[in-house]
Image (cartoon, rainbow, N blue to C red):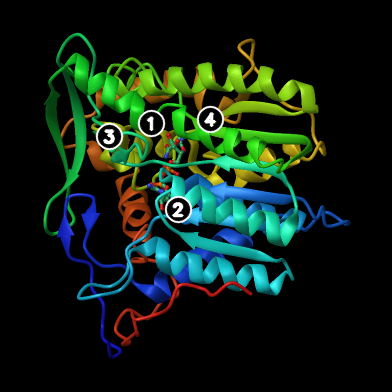
Amino acid sequence: MAARVVSPTGRGFLLLDAHPAGCFRSVADMVAQIPAPQRQPSKLTALIIGSSAGYGLAATLAGLVRHGVQGVGVAFERPPGRRTATAGWYRTIATDAVAAEVGSDFTFVNADAFADTTKDEVLDLLQKRFGQVDVLVYSVAAPRRTDPRTGTTFQSVIKPLGQAHTTRTLEFDADGTAALRDVTAIPAGEQEAADTVQVMGGEDWSRWVTALQDRGLLRDGFRTVALSYIGSGLTSAIYRDGTIGAAKVHLERTAKELDERLAGHGGRALTSVNGAAVTQASTAIPGIALYVSVLRAVLGDALQSPVEQSVQLWDQLTGAAPLDLDEQGRLRLDRWELDPAVQAAVAERWHAITPATIAEVADVDWFRAQFRGLYGFDVPGVDYAAPVDPDLEWPASR
Ligand SMILES: NC(=O)c1ccc[n+]([C@@H]2O[C@H](COP(=O)([O-])OP(=O)(O)OC[C@H]3O[C@@H](n4cnc5c(N)ncnc54)[C@H](O)[C@@H]3O)[C@@H](O)[C@H]2O)c1
């Protein structure tokens, strides 16, 4: 494919193309947020599943730049074809360049993490190149999962449980004007709820840990975290008390089981409860766009980015900082979001919003730039009038 001008087209919070130069620049901007490296690179071997976007990308970059980790990142991205590749494809190319720059042996695998064939491929790679693994970060957000052992495909739904829920939501009209709408989500059926747990619960994470253990790849002191979210009472009907929240409860239960299993190796398995962030996964949740925009209006730059939280995560995983666990044993990186004063201020604004005041009460411009930035658009410093070649290859293993 020849170089061409790539423009944002699509509907709602889903854009059809990604801008390679914008994606590269957004990775560079994330790297710029990472504080100076630890004096001694850790040389820890990490496996990061979901390394091309959101929290998994932030964890990959923070691990590489601050701790000099080596290892493997797994993501599931669409290659370039008639359309550009997905944004995570280009961000992975940029992350590979970061790894080269810091002199880290880090390989990226583009495959379905749920498949046993992917587990075999990744474990072969880890065994051959690094012997054993110190850290597994599980940060997958997927709409469906095929269980390779039964061939059954489960779809995840984002719905309340028990009763319908109407929430206010932020949308953008074609000209970019923010609009306030109401959406009603009908409650999930029992099967839908169970299927969502199959996709977003802890089973696949547990299978990765078991596969590593069965192959003798867990180094003493192995640590694993799976990402979780609790969030505000304002979003709980659709999130924490809904289908995805039920999957997170399953994830937390899985953490307890794995933690007991790993204790024999001096290992740990934890959920890492992170704060709200604008990602492809979170923009699919009704009401979250509005909630995050209000949160940003309240907090400004005190809203902790995925990179800032990932720096703290690594500091805790490497022992540079003590583990900040709650009474249920979950690692908490979301205290800034759930601070009662912050939540009270968010609630006050949330209830005060009208279609006329939305742009003052919520930081909708910031949100729009963030969501377009997920696709490499609206990234400051990028020349969008310049043609770019979208036909770039997935990084080869060095
Ligand atoms: N975004 C938030 O506000 C937020 C807050 C707290 C916790 N979390 C949690 O963080 C985790 C990641 O979410 P995110 O928001 O960063 O999502 P995201 O959409 O930004 O990234 C998802 C990642 O998963 C990968 N992926 C998807 N399907 C895959 C598959 N089948 N095989 C391999 N990789 C696959 C994608 O390639 C991508 O790298 C989730 O568990 C989510 O619940 C998110």
In this view of the protein, which residue sits in the foreground, 294 or 252? 252
Residue 301: % across, % down:
53, 45
Q: In which quarter of the image is residue 4?
A: bottom left
**Is the CB–ligand 1 distance for label 1 below 8 Å?**
yes
What residue occupies the far right of the structure in this picture? 40
Between the C-alphas of marks 3 and 4, the distance is: 25 Å
Instruction: Tell me whether circle 1 and circle 2 mark residues in contact (CB < 8 Å).
Output: no
Give neighbour class at mark 2: few <14, some 14-19, many 20+ (Cα, 10 Å). Answer: many
Residue 276: % across, % down:
44, 35
Work out whether mark 3 precedes mark 4 in sequence or the reverse, and give the earlier one.
4
Question: Residue at 26% of width from left, 20% of height from top?
Answer: 193
Residue 257: % across, % down:
59, 17
Residue at the spot of label 1: 200
Please identify the quadrant where the C terminus is shown.
Answer: bottom right
Circle on res. 374: none
Q: Which amino acid does label 4 sit on?
A: Ser
Between the C-alphas of marks 2 and 4, the distance is: 22 Å
Eye-nearest disc, 2 or 3: 2
Secondary structure found at label 1: helix
**Is the CB–ligand 1 distance for label 2 below 8 Å?**
yes
In this view of the protein, which residue sits in the foreground, 42 or 154? 154
Give neighbour class at mark 1: few <14, some 14-19, many 20+ (Cα, 10 Å). Answer: many
